[in-house]
Image: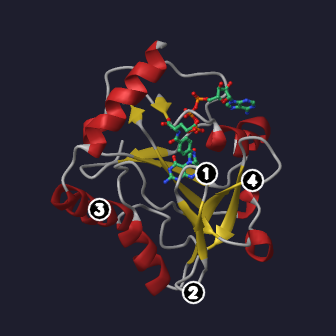
């Protein structure tokens, strides 16, 4: 195994070891930090995710967005395009199904897709990060491929925000040429 996958395994194990109570506390602290982000109140279309594998739980943010009448979207594995994501509208009534990784996603997504370029904010889950902007995801390159247009066209939208538990911070990660730039990383403790 290379260094990246070894680190990925150990960090995933670390976050899975958190108790339900620790997860719930982290999720509520996260919402507090998110609400203070400049610009978040103006955003209308936010892509979020449903937690898997011990990830920092953004469901309080989903609830808050619904309450504030903001539109929430979830990543859906693209059925044709290799390792890319679609973003599909998510409401309390959306029928759900599990994807190949066992993660819940909206069923029959076709009617409610929003193009990635038309999202305001994307909250994406990280496996590890450093204070210099280096990051590690699950290894599929799904977000990198889907948002490669940001670097390509120097696009101002959407704003990508990485989410992770504070304990997923490492000293240094190499930045790869395909890594899409994040505007910040938010943990249960603070904003980097
Ligand atoms: N909550 C959540 N949703 C998400 C992501 C995510 O990281 N978190 N994704 C972000 O990309 C996409 C799914 N990507 C994923 C990539 C790999 C694995 C995974 O568990 N891989 C297995 C190996 C699976 C196999 O090859 O059969 C593993 O590493 O153990 C899960 C999700 C879209 N939705
Ligand atoms: N824009 C792209 N075009 C083609 N391949 C890409 C692109 N972005 C990433 N990849 C490939 O995807 C693979 C996974 O990348 P990496 O290990 O950085 O995943 P990751 O950090 O988990 O990404 P993500 O958080 O986006 O899922 C790499 O082998 C990389 O070559």
Report whether 2 appears left or right of 71: left
| Residue picked out by circle 1 | 100
Q: In the image, what residue occupies the spot 37% across and 45% down?
A: 164
Name the mark nearer the viewer: 1 or 3: 1
Tag 3 or tag 1, which sits nearer the N-term?
3
| Residue picked out by circle 4 | 78
Name the mark nearer the viewer: 3 or 2: 2
Report whether 113 appears left or right of 39: right
Tag 3 or tag 4, which sits nearer the N-term?
3
Name the mark nearer the viewer: 4 or 1: 1
Tag 1 or tag 2, which sits nearer the N-term?
2
Q: Is mark 3 within 8 Å of ligand 1?
A: no
Mark 2, other Cα within 10 Å: few <14 / some 14–19 / many ≥20 = few
Image quadrant in which you'd find residue 145: top right
Q: CA distance from mark 4 to mark 3?
A: 28 Å
Task: Point out residue 12 in the picture as x, y percentages from the top left corner.
Answer: 36, 37
Tag 2 or tag 3, which sits nearer the N-term?
3
Q: Nearer the viewer, residue 30 or 103?
A: 103
Q: Is mark 1 within 8 Å of ligand 1?
A: yes
Q: CA distance from mark 1 to mark 3?
A: 25 Å
Mark 4, other Cα within 10 Å: few <14 / some 14–19 / many ≥20 = some
Q: CA distance from mark 4 to mark 1?
A: 12 Å
Task: Point out residue 93 in the picture as x, y percentages from the top left corner.
Answer: 57, 86
Q: Are the residues at dot 2 and dot 1 in contact (C-beta closer than 8 Å)?
A: no
Name the mark nearer the viewer: 2 or 1: 1
| Residue picked out by circle 3 | 27
Q: CA distance from mark 3 to mark 2?
A: 23 Å
Q: In the image, what residue occupies the spot 60% across and 68% down?
A: 97
Q: Nearer the viewer, residue 150 or 87?
A: 87
Vertical side of 101 occupied by 108: above or below: below
Name the mark nearer the viewer: 4 or 3: 4
């Amino acid at each position: 195994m290379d260094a990246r996958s070894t680190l990925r395994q150990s960090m995933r194990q670390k976050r899975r070891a958190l108790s339900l109570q620790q997860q719930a506390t982290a999720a509520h602290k996260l919402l507090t930090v998110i609400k203070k982000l400049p610009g978040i109140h103006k955003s209308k279309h936010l892509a979020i995710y449903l937690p898997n594998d011990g990830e920092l739980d953004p469901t309080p943010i989903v609830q808050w967005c619904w309450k504030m009448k903001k539109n929430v979207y979830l990543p859906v594995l693209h059925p044709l395009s290799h390792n890319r994501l679609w973003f599909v509208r998510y409401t309390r009534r959306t029928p759900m199904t599990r994807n190949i990784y066992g993660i819940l996603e909206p069923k029959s997504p076709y009617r409610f897709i929003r193009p990635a370029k038309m999202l305001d904010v994307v909250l994406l889950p990280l496996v590890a990060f450093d204070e210099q902007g280096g990051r590690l995801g699950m290894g599929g390159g799904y977000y990198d491929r889907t948002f490669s247009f940001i670097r390509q066209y120097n696009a101002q939208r959407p704003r990508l925000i990485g989410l992770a538990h504070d304990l997923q911070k490492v000293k240094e990660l190499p930045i790869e040429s395909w890594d899409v730039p994040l505007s910040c990383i938010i943990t249960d403790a603070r904003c980097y």
